[in-house]
Image (cartoon, rainbow, N blue to C red):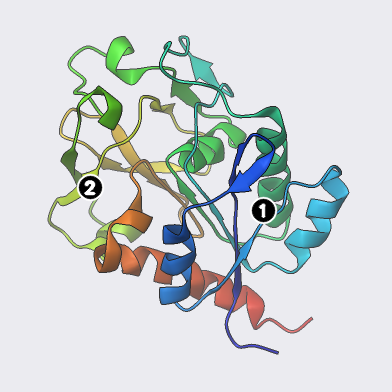
Amino acid sequence: MSTHPTIGITTSLEDDTQLVSRDYVRAVEAAGGIPLLVPMPAEDATLEAVAEVLDGLVIIGGPALADGLTGTLPDDLDPPAPDRLRADRAILRAVRRDDKPVLGICYGMQLLNAEAGGTIYGDVEGQVEGTQTHSQKRGATTHPVTFEPGSHLHRLLGPDPVTVNTRHLQAVCSVGAPFRIVGRAPDGVIEAIESPDGALIGVQFHPERMGAAMRPLFRHLVRHAARRHLQPS
């Protein structure tokens, strides 16, 4: 048996074709995990079987999420394909039943929060006064994020503000249990959430595109997954 934990990576869905940036695969691999792309089968029972071979999960970025929506979606944001959303929900619920760790990225963070009963702004820039532009297609580039002292992300990524990419129109409005808010942009937009034990982390930015600076985040996921992987069956 390999000593490296297996980390599932979800995909996008376009024209009935599953797609994923290799940045996610490389980030998991560089952190010591074995990346495994999660399929979108016809039956959720198949995903239950897939979850059994996973030690952890990355839910990648994607389009809009309507679960727990506050407000309406803007015209320049599309909802996810129904088959993708169904598969993402199914694999997330399956891995969480066994308390396996999850890293949610952008859409993935919002899905984690929605599944926990939290809410999401359909278009945070239009709904919250004073919010800066956070979407690249609307002209945004980067911005700093400050992490809450004592949080896992503060320990992993350092005490100073971290400059991140910004590629979202939606944003978390309220968090569901067991999450707490641990990262914010200067305008107050929620940029990171985590569970008390650090097994569940969601970030609004895209760490897979930030190279070595975000390797501690992926190593954290892999370490949590390794504990599950090495447990006797």
Residue 56 visible somewhere in the drawing: yes
Question: In which quarter of the view is residue 130 placed?
Answer: top left
> How many numbered discs sit on the rendered protein?
2
**Residue carrying label 2:** 164
Pinpoint residue 160: horizontal percent, then vertical percent.
Answer: 12, 56
Residue sitting at 54 percent across and 41 percent down? 112
Viewer-proximal residue, 121 or 207? Answer: 207
Residue sitting at 86 percent across and 44 percent down? 43
For the N terminus, the quadrant is: bottom right
Residue sitting at 65 percent across and 78 percent down? 229
Give the side of residue 197 with respect to residue 9, left or right: left
**Residue carrying label 1:** 96
Question: In which quarter of the view is residue 56 placed?
Answer: bottom right
Few, some or many C-alpha atoms within 10 Å of disc 1 (few <14, some 14-19, many ≥20)? Answer: some
Few, some or many C-alpha atoms within 10 Å of disc 2 (few <14, some 14-19, many ≥20)? Answer: many
Type of residue at label 1?
A: Arg
Q: What element carries label 1?
A: helix
Q: Is residue 6 above or below residue 170?
A: below
Q: Are marks 2 and 1 in contact (CB under 8 Å)?
A: no
Q: In this view, does 52 lie above or below 80?
A: below
Give the side of residue 217 with respect to residue 136, left or right: right
Pinpoint residue 104: horizontal percent, then vertical percent.
Answer: 49, 48
Viewer-proximal residue, 143 or 167? Answer: 167
- Give the number of the mark in front: 2 or 1: 2
Q: Is mark 2 on a helix, strand or loop?
A: strand
Q: Is residue 58 above or below residue 121?
A: below
Kindly give the residue lying farthest to the left in the view shown: 160
Give the side of residue 172 with respect to residue 214, left or right: right
Give the side of residue 54 with respect to residue 193, left or right: right
Viewer-proximal residue, 224 or 43? Answer: 43
Type of residue at label 2?
A: Val
Pinpoint residue 215: horizontal percent, then vertical percent.
Answer: 33, 68
